[in-house]
Every structure is written in structure tokens, then in C-alpha cells.
Image (tube, grey):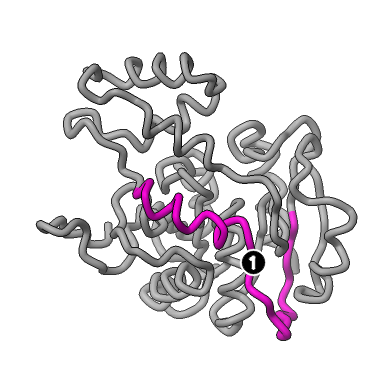
Amino acid sequence: MGLVVRGAGGYQKDMLNTITHGEPTSRTPLLIAHGLYGSARNWGVIARRLSDERQVVAVDMRNHAHSFWDDRHDYPALADDLAEVIESMGGVADVIGHSMGGKSAMTLALEHGEMVNRLVVADIAPVRYSHTQMQYIEAMRAVDMTQVARRSDVEQQLADLGVEKALQSFFTQSLDVPGKRWRLNLDVLAKEMPNIMGFPDFTSHWDGPALFLAGAESDYVQASHREVIKSLFPNARFAKIPGAGHWLHAEKPREFEAAVRIFLNAA
């Protein structure tokens, strides 16, 4: 794992924390970048399964899980974090990014294109979204940590606050029960929410093979987004996973894995 040091002022910046699955092979290694409020651990099952053919490295993005905390949380900064990890992997990787991680991966390809071999963008487009994720930050802030002895205590509080069951489980994976705190920098994520919902303006494009894989039940990637996607990623392909929503990799992990494996192994 990457080193994270906690000092008096919080986390000190180092390379992102990583979880590595498998050994290096003759195939290009794979980097996985999670979405907002997620972590490398969320991708454990898919990463382990894909590591039968190539080494897979999943990261904790800045201000998440075991990575450093920083006041900046925009896509150029997140892309630079990923570039640093890829450099440690040999300088070139295939990249999967979901949601916030997908925007980070797209920015990486557009700014550090030589480091990306193949790109998988999971259920997100390079556009500014009008919705916000602040309601979940407010719910997590509202949890009374003095009443917490186990994860289920927080799940119950989140349920009482109107958070759906699947997301209760998802959020509490970023819970430090003994420390009675979230492993999420909620203050910075709230402050930077406009940047997270947005996307930088680019005049460049990336010509490598890209797969935009969406959940058929999700409205994050719409037909109207294809023009801007194609302008930035001329060789983009599009696919949908039936019965899946925004968290397609968690809802349909086998189908997600199969689609990614076919794309990564294509001639």
C-alpha cells in the first residue's frame, strides 16, 4: 500500500494508497479509480477476478479512505494523482474509472495520454451535472458518533435519515468504527462539490480505445452526451449493462467484468 502518514494537522500528502492484486504479466497492468465516497476496497471482487490475466492496482482517491487529505479536489489534481501511481507501475496502464473516478480517468487521458493504453469510463460523461451529492454528506455529518459501537449502528442512523439500504452499506465501508469518524474528508468534498459535478474545458482529444460503459437503468450517460464524448474521445465505443443503475459494477459485477475483459483483450 502507498504510505499515508497522519500528523497533527491531518493527512500528509504522499502517493495515493493502493491495493495491488496479482503479479505483473506480459499484459498491460490495470488501474482502477473509484467514485465519490468510494474506496479501493469497493472494487476488491472485480479487481481480484481481473488479476488472473494482468496485475490490477486499485487506488483510494485523495480525501477518501486511506489516502491523504488535501484542500484541492478537482480533476486536474486527481488526474495527476493517478499519473503518479501509473509511473510507479511502469509508466503505462489500462484505466477503469467510475463516476468521479471516470472523470479523473478521462482527464488523465486528455492530459497524460501517453500513460493510458485503454480507457474504460463507467457510467459518467465529460459534462457538468446539475444534480448534487450534498445530501449524502449532510446525512454522514448528522450521524452521532457517540452512539456508534459497530457499523450497524451507523447503518441504522443513516436509514433513519432516509438513506437507502444499498448506500448505507456502501458509505459505512468508509467508516472508522474504533476512531468514531468517517475516512472521508467531508468538509473538502462539500466545498469542492461544484468541481466534482463539473468537468474541465478541453480543446485536446485522446485517440486511444475508450469504452463508455453505462447502466441501462441510469441516466448519467445520455444520447445527448455522445457528441461531446466523441469530440474528446474519437475512438469511443458505447455499451450498456441491462438491469444496472449508476453503481453498475456493484449491481452487476459479473456482467461488468465480462464487458471489461472483452474490451481490454480486444486486438
Instruction: Indicate the position of residue 265 as horizontal and vertical percent values.
Output: 68, 61
- Residue where numbered disc 1 is placed: 199
The magenta stretch spans which residues?
185-212
Instruction: Indicate the position of residue 141 as horizontal and vertical percent values.
Output: 37, 34
Whether residue 236 sits left or right of residue 43 in the image: it is right
Whether residue 179 sits left or right of residue 171 in the image: it is left
Between 265 and 122, the one lying in front of the other is 122
User: What's the residue at 64%, 31% (across, down)?
Assistant: 251
User: What's the residue at 73%, 66% (across, down)?
Assistant: 210
Residue 203: say if magenta.
yes
Image position of 163 with respect to 137: above or below: above
- Type of residue at label 1? Phe
- Considering every residue shown, the one lying at the far left of the view is 8
Secondary element at image label 1: loop
Instruction: Indicate the position of residue 120 as horizontal and vertical percent values.
Output: 66, 60
Whether residue 21 sits left or right of residue 236 in the image: it is left
Residue 38: say if magenta.
no
Q: Where is the N terminus found, in terms of image quarters?
A: bottom left
Between 44 and 162, the one lying in front of the other is 162
Whether residue 19 sits left or right of residue 203 in the image: it is left
Q: Residues within 10 Å of mark 1 (few under 14, many from 20)?
A: many
Q: Where is the C terminus found, in terms of image quarters?
A: bottom right
Image position of 62 with respect to 114: above or below: above
User: What's the residue at 10%, 57% (across, down)?
Assistant: 8
Image position of 187 with respect to 161: above or below: below
